[in-house]
């Protein structure tokens, strides 16, 4: 009954709005691709420039974390910032995630805008009480008296050969909590636009980067390079339009999904790839609009499958677009094991492009028998 | 890529070397052209110290203080340190060697002394030094202590009558509450645990406002979102009470850092109990505050009990004050049931925190006379006569009253007038709070984020539709 009510609310005006939004955006996307820009920027530089510009624009913004200052950042994301802004605004901390997260929240309570860097989000576990109980819930519990304009950022998910305690994806953990916003950039444009939006946002934001994407280059337009550039939080991006199957992904998996779409297109399957960009709030409108167009869905994530992002996306589609589905929703996720270290095992524990291709074909009832795929 | 890194590395070294020079010249130590460690801290007012006061991690970047990182990264470009027979530089500083193996004892022979001004009969101890208070201030302190005591009694009774769901008293800790608040300014930020409503009372929170929060009515500043006693007021610089233990300690350091960046003439103060010092946040906050040189007062109410855990099972150190030194923090132990001692100590701590930009640890020894909360019956784990002893013979209010009356500033008549007036005011406040309607249904969905998101707006609409369809199932005292 709840589902029926939801669908009623969700059908007419929302879908119409979304379609109207999609068409001009799609055209602009294509236009931008052909424009004379073609300046390339790594994700690392994109993040660095975003931090630099926001710190320059607002003196209450400051960066805190292990190795962010003198070492220029564990992954060099904060390169040059200590020199430019001094030790008052780029703070190297003792090794205490609980400590500096709590201190960041306290500073935010009083009106500063901290950016807390975790060397990886695996270490945010040592500070998660402050993230959830001190940051996420404060505005609500204090009835608006205490706002926490803080950003928690750092690499999330698997890198390469770093083992179980350095490879977990925390998107589902943080996206579970009301009061937090959770962003997952993929390209340099995402990195710049979403980080700027996160820093300017009055709510606590979890900004999940990816270590392996730091060195990747993407084309950026003049608009993206402008210091006022900002992306809206809660809006996904259609990276590739298609009509046969929708593939949702975030962070590094967007790249894999695009590769899979390329392979699928050669076999006559036109896949639409959605770069989620924002996990909370999730752009349910865009996902559902896409599924209503293609009638088939594959969700892709790197993290553990149980209670993951794909599960939420599937439920959203079941609640709002059930009659539009022509096949069960396919979910591609990492293996349900702590990440192994050995390279061959690690490769089998994370999704590969082939896994996405096979899932898309299953959704299109074009699956090939397992033996042939080996 | 490699070239860039080298260039950056050498500029780092150059920067550190440049900073090192002033302190070395001013230190008075036998000069050596190279060193890997530190010189003793320079006197206040020297250029190195002035510079270091501004930086957060000044200890690490400016010579004259310990600089582990600097020491480690420094190239031994000038050769080895030729050591003295007796002392050698290690990262962290010069240490003297000794040929005997000596473990530091686990505790000192004598416990740290406790500062006190008034004896048990409310007379100032001869030779005691304390911060003088005017008659007006002294009386305000006294009347607020009495008000706090009566407020606790009446709200506790209200919970027992089922009119509020929960309450927590500060019995026995009225001097800590009021005297510490009296020594602070309104710009000082308070991050409480939960047994410090007296600080809010001192600052001007009215009995009606307390009642509104406990009843969770529509005038509650928390919009009915929290359990009773989780007060908060932006206007009075008192951060909303939060349940997890000791999380307010690192918050206070962050807030203090923020005050320091703004160059405000104010400090942060945070309260916690003996139990709270076992949390990881205690360690992180004290360590960090020392390194950051944050103007924060860490006020520990050592009342002997963490629910049913006595301090003997909480820690094995000499209370809490002894730990300050381990972090490089100045501390004092004070008689928490002596209003004048608490006032003087906080007054001095505040001066130091602000003018010197440093954290201070205050351990106030006291006794939790009441139960932990209305969900606790402490007679189950401690002797009733112990509780009675502290409730009567060691009561901070009657002790302070003896001093105030000893100055001819207070009379029995005024005492009974005060108590009956406050009691009446409280009963009226409770009645009014009880009758006030609860917050409307919209407030269930606001403030999750700065702006309400579309999914919550949808949920709210759905809830309203359901209420319209089934009015009989919906409570009458909650406005839609």
Image (cartoon, coloured by chain):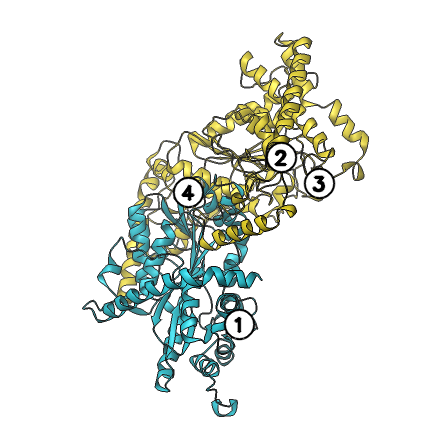
Chain colours: A cyan, B yellow
For mark 2, name the chain.
B
Q: Residues within 10 Å of mark 4 (few under 14, many from 20)?
A: many
Instruction: Tell us which disc is closer to us: 2 or 3.
Output: 2
Question: In the drawing, what numbered circle is on residue B307?
Answer: 3
Instruction: Tell us which disc is closer to us: 4 or 3.
Output: 3
Instruction: Tell us which disc is closer to us: 1 or 4.
Output: 1
Q: Position of residue B80 (x, y in %)?
A: 38, 55
Q: Are marks 2 and 1 in contact (CB under 8 Å)?
A: no
Residue at image mark 1: A339
**What is the CA distance from the residue labelled 1 to the residue labelled 4?**
43 Å
> Quick check: can you spot residue A184?
no
Residue at image mark 4: B65
Residue at image mark 2: B215
Q: Are marks 1 and 3 in contact (CB under 8 Å)?
A: no
Q: Residues within 10 Å of mark 3 (few under 14, many from 20)?
A: some
Label 1: element kind: loop
Looking at the rendered image, the quarter that the N terminus of chain A falls into is: bottom right
Q: Is residue A51 above or below residue B433?
A: below
Identify which residue, A123 or A264, lies in the foreground: A264
Label 4: element kind: loop
Precedes in sequence: disc 2 or disc 4: 4
């Amino acid at each position: 009954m709840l589902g029926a009510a939801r669908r009623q609310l969700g059908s007419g005006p929302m879908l119409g709005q979304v379609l109207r939004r999609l068409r001009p955006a799609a055209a602009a996307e294509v236009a931008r691709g052909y424009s004379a820009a073609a300046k390339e920027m790594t994700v690392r530089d994109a993040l660095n420039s975003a931090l630099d510009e926001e710190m320059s624009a607002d003196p209450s913004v400051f960066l805190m974390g292990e190795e962010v200052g003198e070492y220029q950042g564990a992954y060099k994301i904060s390169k040059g910032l200590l020199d430019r802004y001094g030790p008052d605004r780029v703070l190297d901390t003792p090794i205490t995630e609980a400590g500096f997260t709590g201190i960041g929240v306290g500073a935010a309570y009083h009106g500063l805008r901290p950016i807390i860097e975790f060397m990886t989000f695996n270490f945010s576990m040592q500070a998660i009480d402050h993230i959830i109980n001190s940051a996420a819930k404060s505005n609500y519990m204090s009835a608006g008296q205490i706002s926490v304009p803080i950003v928690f950022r750092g690499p999330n998910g698997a890198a390469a050969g770093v083992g179980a305690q350095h490879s977990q994806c925390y998107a589902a953990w943080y996206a579970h909590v009301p009061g937090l916003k959770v962003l997952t950039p993929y390209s340099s444009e995402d990195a710049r636009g979403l980080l700027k939006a996160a820093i300017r946002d009055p709510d606590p934001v979890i900004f999940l980067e990816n270590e392996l994407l730091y060195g990747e280059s993407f084309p950026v337009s003049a608009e993206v390079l402008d210091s006022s550039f900002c992306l809206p939080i809660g809006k996904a991006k259609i990276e590739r339009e298609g009509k046969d199957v929708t593939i949702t992904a975030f962070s590094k998996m967007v790249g894999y999904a695009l590769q899979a779409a390329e392979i699928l297109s050669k076999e006559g399957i036109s896949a639409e790839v959605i770069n989620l960009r924002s996990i909370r709030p999730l752009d349910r409108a865009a996902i559902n609009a896409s599924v209503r167009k293609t009638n088939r869905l594959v969700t892709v994530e790197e993290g553990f499958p149980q209670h993951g992002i794909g599960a939420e996306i599937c439920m959203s589609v079941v609640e709002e677009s059930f009659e539009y589905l022509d096949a069960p929703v396919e979910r591609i996720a990492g293996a349900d094991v702590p990440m192994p270290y050995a390279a061959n095992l690690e490769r089998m524990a994370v999704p590969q492009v082939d896994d996405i291709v096979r899932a898309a074909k299953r959704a299109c009832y074009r699956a090939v028998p397992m033996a042939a795929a080996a | 890529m490699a070239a860039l890194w080298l260039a950056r590395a050498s500029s780092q070294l150059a920067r550190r070397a440049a900073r090192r020079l002033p302190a070395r010249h001013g230190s008075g130590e036998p000069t050596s052209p190279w060193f890997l460690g530190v010189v003793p801290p320079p006197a206040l007012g020297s250029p190195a110290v002035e510079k270091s006061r501004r930086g957060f991690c000044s200890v690490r970047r400016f010579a004259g203080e310990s600089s582990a990182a600097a020491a480690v990264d420094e190239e031994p470009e000038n050769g080895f340190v030729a050591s003295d027979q007796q002392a050698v530089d290690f990262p962290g500083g010069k240490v003297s060697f000794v040929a005997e193996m000596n473990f530091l004892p686990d505790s000192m022979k004598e416990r740290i002394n406790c500062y006190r001004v008034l004896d048990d009969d409310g007379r100032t101890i001869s030779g005691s030094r304390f911060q003088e208070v005017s008659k007006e201030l002294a009386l305000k302190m006294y009347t607020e202590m009495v008000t706090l005591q009566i407020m606790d009694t009446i709200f506790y009774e209200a919970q027992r009558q089922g009119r509020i769901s929960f309450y927590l008293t500060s019995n026995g800790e009225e001097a800590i509450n009021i005297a510490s608040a009296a020594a602070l300014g309104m710009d000082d930020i308070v991050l409480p645990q939960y047994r410090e409503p007296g600080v809010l009372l001192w600052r001007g929170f009215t009995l009606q406002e307390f009642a509104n929060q406990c009843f969770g009515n529509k005038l509650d500043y928390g919009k009915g979102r929290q359990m009773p006693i989780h007060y908060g007021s932006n206007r009075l610089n008192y951060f909303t009470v939060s349940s997890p233990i000791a999380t307010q300690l690192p918050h206070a350091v962050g807030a203090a850092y923020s005050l320091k960046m703004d160059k405000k003439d104010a400090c942060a103060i945070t309260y916690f109990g003996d139990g709270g010092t076992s949390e990881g946040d205690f360690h992180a906050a004290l360590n960090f505050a020392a390194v950051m040189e944050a103007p924060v007062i860490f006020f520990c109410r050592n009342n002997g009990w963490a629910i049913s855990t006595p301090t003997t099972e909480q820690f094995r150190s000499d209370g809490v004050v002894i730990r300050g030194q381990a972090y490089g923090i100045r501390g004092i132990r004070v008689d928490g049931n002596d209003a004048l001692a608490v006032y003087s100590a906080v007054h001095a701590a505040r001066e130091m925190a602000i003018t010197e930009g440093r954290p201070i640890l205050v351990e106030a020894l006291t006794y939790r006379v009441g139960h932990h909360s209305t969900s606790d019956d402490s007679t189950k784990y401690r002797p009733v006569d112990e509780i009675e002893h502290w409730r009567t013979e060691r009561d901070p209010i009657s002790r302070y009253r003896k001093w105030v009356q000893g100055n001819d500033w207070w009379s029995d008549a005024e005492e009974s007038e005060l108590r009956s007036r406050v009691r009446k005011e409280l009963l009226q406040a409770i009645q009014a709070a009880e009758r006030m309607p609860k917050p409307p249904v919209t407030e269930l969905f606001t403030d999750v984020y700065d702006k309400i998101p579309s999914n919550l707006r949808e949920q709210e609409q759905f809830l309203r539709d359901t209420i319209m369809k089934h009015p009989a199932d919906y409570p009458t005292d909650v406005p839609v």
